[in-house]
Image (spheres, rainbow, N blue to C red):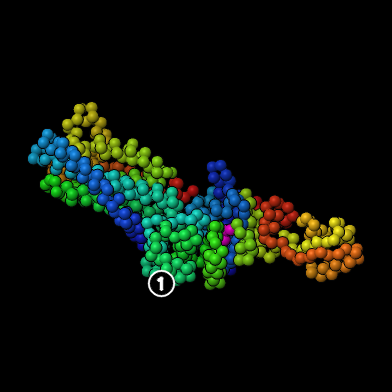
Amino acid sequence: MSGFRTLLYKEILRFWKVLVQTVGAPVLTALLYLLIFSHVLEEHVQVYPGVSYTAFLMPGLIMMSVLQNAFANSSSSLIQSKITGNIVFVLLPPLSYLEFFMAYLIAALVRGFTVGLGVLLVGLFFADIEMRYPLWILAFALSSGAVFACMGIMAGIWANQYDNLAAVQNFLIMPLTFLSGVFYSIHSLPDFWQGVSHFNPVFYMIDGFRYGFFGQGDVDPWLSLAVVTPFVVLLSGLTLMMLKSGYKLRH
Amino acid sequence: MAAAVRLRGLHKRFPRVHALRGIDLEIAEGEFFALLGPNGAGKTTLISILAGLTRATDGSVSIMGFDVARQYRQARRALGVVPQELVYDPFFTVRETLRLQSGYFGLRRNDAWIDELLANLGLADKADTYTRLLSGGMKRRVLVAQALVHKPPVIVLDEPTAGVDVELRQSLWHFIRRLNRDGHTILLTTHYLEEAETLCERVAMLKEGRLVALDRTENLLRGGGGRRLVLELDVTELPASLRPRLTGRDGARFILDLPDYGDLEAILASLRQAGVGVCDMALGQADLEEVFLKIMHGVGHDTPEQA
């Protein structure tokens, strides 16, 4: 247990030491989205009755930040350790693959939540945000963050260099999060794209999360949870299998 | 005595290379042991398997009686590895690095031992410096300290002195010798054969994944040609009576076999008899480097190859 605790502590300390990059920068990015989109759309768009566009945008931005940073934390930590070679420091001690998994997973969630909280705090200056169902908020933040943390672990282990990781980030993570209804309700989309959005799991993550704030969403939060939960199970399972096999870590 | 390290029928096949082709080896507790071999012989693969960084294709490996696959926790706790590459974590200071490493091994309050390690490795004044800011030699010392945080009974040093200055080499060996005297088993790989010769009681040589020599250092040295006499004469031909002893020539110098110092008298007598004058004379012994080259080129050594 103590080995796991140390690895978790190290993973948190790692991003904590460069807080400006790891938390400050993504909060600033979210703030820029918030300023630009709310400036352009505040007067023109009202998605849900009684909810301003800026308020509508906030949960989407928070969730996007949680997801992207959970992914970034585990993936960049692993690729850095692999490239610099210091991954041996955690491979030589008697840590089980389960301890390894839990440490990277939880640290990624802590990073995601820290950034998410930062975005929320900044957002409070711009809009009144109610949080009607905190349990839904927490459930979606945890489950969705875990999915992206797992993806980050897998990508970090799979990637041989930073380019590989950038490809995953640019061609998978970015499109998935941007086309998931962060900035709009999918009901505003043409039928075809509405249909496509229903195949994007990130849509359910964001919609369920947003439901927790306003009690309104594009689909029922239970449906969203039913979609997201199997992804948590599937990706945790895959990540654990990968770690157990020693893929690219132990020859 | 119990074996600190035991390898049985160890094979490692990579997709393109059969890196280890059946290694059987036992290193006793408290030994100072050298594993030698040219690049690509399989030394690092063997060490990676001990450390659990690489998995064996076939055969078994145990550290202090613990199987590295089935009882990996105990096996890894018994082993400290100083890796060959100069690796470090840029996010942490020396002390943070050592505290984290202790924690991975389940040691939560380890500062007394960490301070002792820092003092012994000349790192005390660098404790709060970021490892990335240290010189290469200093980083190497941090790696040694990291390998020792959990006081492992078996210590593996994979080419610890590659690119390290003389002073550090001396102080490093001083410290490692002390650990050996305190009962730690040391397994060393190095390209500096004189280090292995002076430090290690027993030597194994690997070639193309096979063990081609395994013996006490002094036996290997003896088997490698023993003592010899180097003569520079005032003639260009060696007297006929001495030719059977001739093992080689080095320019104008004749190298004669000298199994026993007693033979010296007879050799000098033969020279006198032939009326040959001696310009220069030296006694010598084959060093490990010669033995190594001889074995690697597969001539004149009778240690059986292990299949």
Q: Is residue A95 above or below residue A249?
A: below
Residue B244 in percent (x, y) is at: 85, 58
Question: What number of labels is visible?
Answer: 1
- Is the magenta region chiefly helix, strand or loop? strand
Q: Is residue B277 left or right of residue A51?
A: right
Is residue B190 shown above or below A207? below
Q: Name the chain under label 1.
A: B
Q: Which residue is depicted at the point 50% across and 57% down? A: B83
Q: Visible in this render: residue B221?
A: yes
Local SS, label 1: helix
Query: What residue is shown at x 33% (from left), y 38% (from top)?
Result: A170
Q: Residues within 10 Å of mark 1 (few under 14, many from 20)?
A: few
Q: Is residue B74 left or right of residue A70?
A: right
Is B58 or B277 nearer to us in this picture?
A: B277
Judged left or right of residue A86, residue A44 is: left
User: Is residue B24 in view from this perspective?
Assistant: no
Q: Label 1 belongs to which residue?
A: B112
The magenta span reads: B186-190
What residue is shown at x 21% (from left), y 31% (from top)? A194
Q: Residue at x 24, y 33 (%)?
A: A197
Observer-nearest of B146 and B59: B146
Farthest residue to the left: give it.
Answer: A50
The quarter in which the N terminus of chain A is drawn is bottom left
Label 1 amino acid? Answer: Ala
Front in this rendered view, residue B241 or B199: B241
